[in-house]
Image: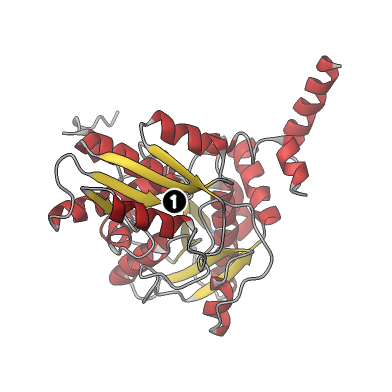
């Protein structure tokens, strides 16, 4: 049995997440597909990494002082990570979030002691956008700093210095491809830059949901969105500071329906309860794996990010009525359970 020594503090629990071979995706791609289990972080998402690096960077620059406040605009997961890190370091937290995100994220933030400010979802150009609202609140709050995850490159440094070396070591120094979606761009850019430092031949692929503009940007040089997605925390309409210089070699556009296929299969076949962003990432990894196999790469290994736990979406992604209302396929067990509940109530 491999028993590690005790960690010196709770923040050391962030990162060094396990990586796992995914049987169903590997069979579908004809090569080994690996998922980096970011749901194993204390805040149950990949965003814990960015939160830790951003707060440490603000401390190092002398902007965040004892008793201070961290303000952030987020779809939820970064806010949860910020709240946990801030609690561990003695800071207060104010989180601004669109009011169409999952109830579980809102309840979690309140449970962690964060002050939660909800705003209507709107375009980035609108002054009421959650990012701009969080910036104004930081400016108006004494002793506060704005985390600014979208344009604060401490975000992507978390993945250059942490996630990428972990993947390289865990896969024995042989990585043929990496892909994930972009929200802030910190993960795809940071892991891409970090892995390319080990081997320039590693193919970095953007996996973009519908409703985002980056697929067309990397494919055709134009920021143009098409369609829509219910996925939370991914999809971007501009080139953030974290995305500048990202080494994107190719790109895929993945529908919610494709992503849900893998959300369903990974739960039913492999016991992993994940969010839709993870399903979209896995669909992109399968596409990248197939591409590398078709090119004749011998036994390619492809890694992606399993972003967060599905337990954060019980009222949405794992709710039959919500899925049906969105025109999305309902998982068969949810349909059965919903029908059984209706029969009992009748």
Where in the figure is residue 37, as x and y percent of width and height? 43, 44
Residue 331 in view: no
Q: Quadrant of residue 322?
A: top right
Residue 302 in view: yes
Residue 23 to residue 158: above or below: above
Most extreme residue toward the bottom is: 221
Where's the C terminus, which quadrant? top right
Residue at 38 percent across and 37 percent down: it is 115
Where in the figure is residue 86, as x and y percent of width and height? 26, 40
Where's the N terminus, which quadrant? top left
- Pick the front one: 268 or 137: 137
Dot 1 falls on a residue whose secondary structure is loop
Where in the figure is residue 50, as x and y percent of width and height? 33, 52
On screen, residue 159 versus residue 177, left or right, reads left
- Pick the front one: 54 or 208: 54
- Pick the front one: 18 or 158: 158
Most extreme residue toward the front is: 140
Where in the figure is residue 345, as x and y percent of width and height? 82, 16
Residue at 28 percent across and 71 percent down: it is 197
Crowd tier of the residue under label 1, counting other residues whose Cα lies within 10 Å: few below 14, some 14–19, many 20 or above: many
Q: How many marks?
A: 1
Residue 283 to residue 224: above or below: above
Q: Which residue is mark 1?
A: 74
- The color scheme shown is secondary structure
Residue 192 to residue 50: above or below: below
- Pick the front one: 28 or 162: 162
Residue at 44 percent across and 73 percent down: it is 239
């Amino acid at each position: 049995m491999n028993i590690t020594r005790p960690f010196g503090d709770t923040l050391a629990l962030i990162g060094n997440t396990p990586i796992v071979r995914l049987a169903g995706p590997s069979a579908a791609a004809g090569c080994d597909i690996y998922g980096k289990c970011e749901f194993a972080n204390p805040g149950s998402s990949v965003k814990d990494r960015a939160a830790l690096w951003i707060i440490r960077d603000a401390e190092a620059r002398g902007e965040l002082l004892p008793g201070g406040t961290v303000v952030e605009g987020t779809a939820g997961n970064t806010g949860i990570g910020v709240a946990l890190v801030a609690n561990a370091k003695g800071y207060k937290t104010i989180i601004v979030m669109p009011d169409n995100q999952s109830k579980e994220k809102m309840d979690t933030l309140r449970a962690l002691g964060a002050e939660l400010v909800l705003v209507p979802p709107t375009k980035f150009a609108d002054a009421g956008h959650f990012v701009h609202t969080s910036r104004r609140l930081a400016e108006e709050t004494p002793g506060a700093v704005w985390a600014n995850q979208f344009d604060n490159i401490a975000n992507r440094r978390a993945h250059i210095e942490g996630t990428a070396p972990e993947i390289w070591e865990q896969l024995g120094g042989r990585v043929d491809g990496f892909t994930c979606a972009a929200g802030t761009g910190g993960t795809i850019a940071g892991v891409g830059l970090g892995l390319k430092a080990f081997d320039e031949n590693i193919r970095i692929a953007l996996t973009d949901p519908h409703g985002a503009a980056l697929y067309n940007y990397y494919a055709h040089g134009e920021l143009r969105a098409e369609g829509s997605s219910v996925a939370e925390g991914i999809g971007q309409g501009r080139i953030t500071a974290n995305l500048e210089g990202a080494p994107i070699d190719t790109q895929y556009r993945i529908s919610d329906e494709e992503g849900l296929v893998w959300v369903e299969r990974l739960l039913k076949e492999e016991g992993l309860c994940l969010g839709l962003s993870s399903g979209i990432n896995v669909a992109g990894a399968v596409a990248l794996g197939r591409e590398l196999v078709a090119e004749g790469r011998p036994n390619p290994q492809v890694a992606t990010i399993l972003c967060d736990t599905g337990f954060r979406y019980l009222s949405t992604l794992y709710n039959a009525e919500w899925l049906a209302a969105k025109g999305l396929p309902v998982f068969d067990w949810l349909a059965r359970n919903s029908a059984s509940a209706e029969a009992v109530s009748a």
